[in-house]
Image (spheres, rainbow, N blue to C red):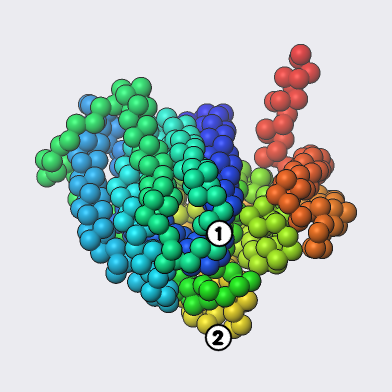
């Protein structure tokens, strides 16, 4: 795939991700409006609705991303284009996912206890009720990823990022139904008083969205000529290599799950305290953190990943090094501005979920601490995929082990701080451990590739940082003019005013950043801008 092709694919991926993420934020805002942000009910739903994704990630999440694309690229040289291999691999994976889902449903009470050990009895029973509706999502998360990664490997990038739009629309409709039927009853409702109907609509609509998100991808399979036919003849088709890769990734996911359990357990210790960051609060802060990562990093890196896998399969290390450098520099072009902007609008972003100064003071600092690690987190995403393209999942296991040990140590230390600082401490542990993980990962990748274009990458990022100085100053001035962190200020008083504040600051910073990139002669930006300027001049 050419650079232009990667650019088009990245744009298509990003456009779908933007729409789905915007709807995801709308869903999160409506969820807070429907059931609140803190207290036993929201915490029970946050834990239960997070279980399917957590368990799916343990069983297959990263395994599929790490294994599927490189293996399908290699199988593409077969006379049938890899169709038989895809059917066998998909059948095996779906069998494992189905069995996992059944076991998880049977163990729902134990899973709720593991992820929320300090929930009181009523909250625990409510979380179990939610979990019984939510846990079937495991199978459909897996189906969505399987079908989508095959489409990505076949260079059909759009459906994977546009399908979540359907999920969010259905989930939002379910939340609106909750508000229409029950009004403001769920706000502050004690966990013991939640009715079966309320639980069914809330959790059932969340699961229905995941089901639709997965099944719609079969349509796009048909469009590119793929047909799924179950095939249980797994021997003799080279699945051993895929299994070996998957085993290390499975271990890596177990490690990250341990980190998630520790984080949830530490946060649940303050679940019933007012004015303190809860599990739901950190979930929303992480959602905000992941917005630029999903739109920018995942879109660009996914488009490069197929080409990385092709070059790695051919043994073209020089081209692979160039891919890694180009992906990291391309991501940085936008992610630097995104990180700076998120820090400045963090309190307004928090006010979108809970208007007023209190919401900004609870969630805002958590967002800022997470965002400090956004650039390293995005670079690490590319470095990991470079190892996956090489068929190496063993090395990522060890630098993930390093990260998890650091995070767990930091999270445990948070138990000794004041309750209002625990959420910030968890975020700080995440950021510090992620930065340390990136340093180790880069050292290991340099050894594997015989070098990396670190001077070129550092030079590009230095230009990005110089270009963002003036936008940060302007953004801060606008933020202060809109009232900043003042009770009743325009920036915090309501959801519409908070959104307007973010739009004004983001627009001003973006325009000034474009000017700054041009002045510092960023080759990555000029490579994009100059063809556009030439076309405009011809018109």
Q: Quick one: 478 or 280, which is closer to the camera?
A: 280
Can residue 455 be spotted in the picture?
Answer: no
Can residue 103 be spotted in the picture?
Answer: yes
Label 2 SS: helix
Residue 287 position in % (x across, y down): 55, 54
For the residues labelled 2 and 1, the Cα–Cα distance comes to 31 Å
* Left or right placement of residue 520 versus residue 322 in this view: right
Disc 1 target residue: 187
| 34 lies above or below 439 | above
Q: Residues within 10 Å of mark 2 (few under 14, many from 20)?
A: few
Q: Quick one: 262 or 525, which is closer to the camera?
A: 262
* Left or right placement of residue 363 versus residue 253 in this view: right
| 44 lies above or below 464 | below
Residue 345 position in % (x across, y down): 73, 54
* Left or right placement of residue 495 versus residue 162 in this view: right
Disc 2 target residue: 416
| 145 lies above or below 469 | above
Q: Quick one: 273 or 326, which is closer to the camera?
A: 273
Residue 431 position in % (x across, y down): 58, 67
First in residue order: circle 2 vs circle 1: 1
């Amino acid at each position: 795939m050419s650079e232009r092709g990667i650019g088009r694919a990245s744009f298509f991926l990003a456009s779908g991700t933007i729409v789905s993420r915007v709807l995801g934020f709308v869903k999160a805002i409506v969820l807070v409006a429907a059931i609140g942000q803190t207290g036993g009910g929201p915490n029970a739903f946050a834990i239960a609705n997070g279980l399917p994704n957590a368990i799916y990630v343990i069983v297959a999440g990263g395994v599929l991303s790490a294994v599927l694309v490189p293996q399908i690229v290699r199988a593409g040289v077969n006379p049938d284009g890899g169709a038989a291999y895809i059917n066998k691999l998909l059948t095996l994976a779906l069998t494992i996912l189905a069995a996992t889902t059944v076991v998880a449903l049977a163990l729902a009470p134990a899973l709720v206890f593991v992820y929320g050990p300090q929930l009181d009895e009523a909250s625990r029973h409510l979380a179990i009720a939610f979990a019984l509706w939510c846990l079937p999502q495991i199978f459909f998360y897996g189906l969505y990823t399987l079908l989508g990664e095959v489409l990505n490997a076949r260079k059909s990038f759009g459906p994977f990022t546009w399908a979540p739009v359907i999920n969010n629309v259905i989930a939002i409709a379910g939340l609106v139904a909750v508000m229409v039927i029950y009004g403001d009853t769920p706000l502050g409702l004690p966990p013991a008083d939640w009715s079966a109907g309320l639980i069914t609509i809330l959790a059932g609509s969340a699961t229905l969205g995941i089901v639709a998100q997965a099944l719609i991808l079969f349509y796009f399979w048909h469009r590119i000529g793929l047909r799924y036919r179950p095939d249980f003849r797994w021997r003799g088709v080279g699945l051993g290599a895929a299994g070996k890769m998957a085993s290390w990734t499975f271990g890596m996911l177990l490690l990250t799950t341990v980190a998630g359990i520790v984080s949830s357990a530490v946060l649940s210790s303050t679940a019933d305290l007012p004015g303190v960051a809860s599990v739901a609060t950190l979930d929303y802060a992480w959602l905000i953190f992941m917005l630029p990562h999903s739109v920018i990093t995942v879109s660009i890196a996914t488009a490069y990943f197929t080409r990385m896998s092709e070059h790695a399969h051919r043994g073209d290390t020089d081209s692979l090094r160039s891919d890694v450098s180009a992906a990291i520099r391309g991501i940085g072009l936008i992610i630097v501005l995104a990180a700076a902007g998120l820090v400045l609008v963090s309190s307004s972003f928090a006010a979108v979920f809970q208007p007023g100064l209190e919401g900004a003071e609870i969630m805002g600092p958590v967002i800022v601490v997470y965002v400090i690690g956004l650039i390293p987190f995005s670079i690490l995403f590319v470095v990991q995929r470079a190892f996956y393209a090489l068929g190496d999942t063993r090395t990522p296991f060890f630098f993930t082990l390093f990260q998890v040990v650091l995070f767990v140590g930091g999270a445990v230390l948070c138990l000794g701080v004041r309750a209002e600082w625990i959420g910030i401490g968890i975020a700080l542990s995440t950021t510090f451990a992620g930065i340390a993980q990136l340093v180790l990962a880069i050292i290991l990748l340099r050894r594997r590739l015989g070098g990396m274009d670190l001077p070129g990458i550092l030079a590009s990022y230095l230009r990005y940082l110089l270009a963002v100085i003036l936008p940060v100053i302007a953004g801060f001035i606008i933020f202060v003019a809109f009232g900043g962190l003042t009770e009743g200020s325009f920036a915090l008083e309501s959801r519409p005013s908070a959104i307007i504040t973010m739009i004004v600051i983001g627009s001003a910073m973006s325009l000034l950043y474009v000017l700054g990139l041009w002045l510092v002669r960023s080759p990555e930006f000029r490579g994009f801008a100059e063809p556009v300027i030439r076309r405009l001049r011809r018109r």
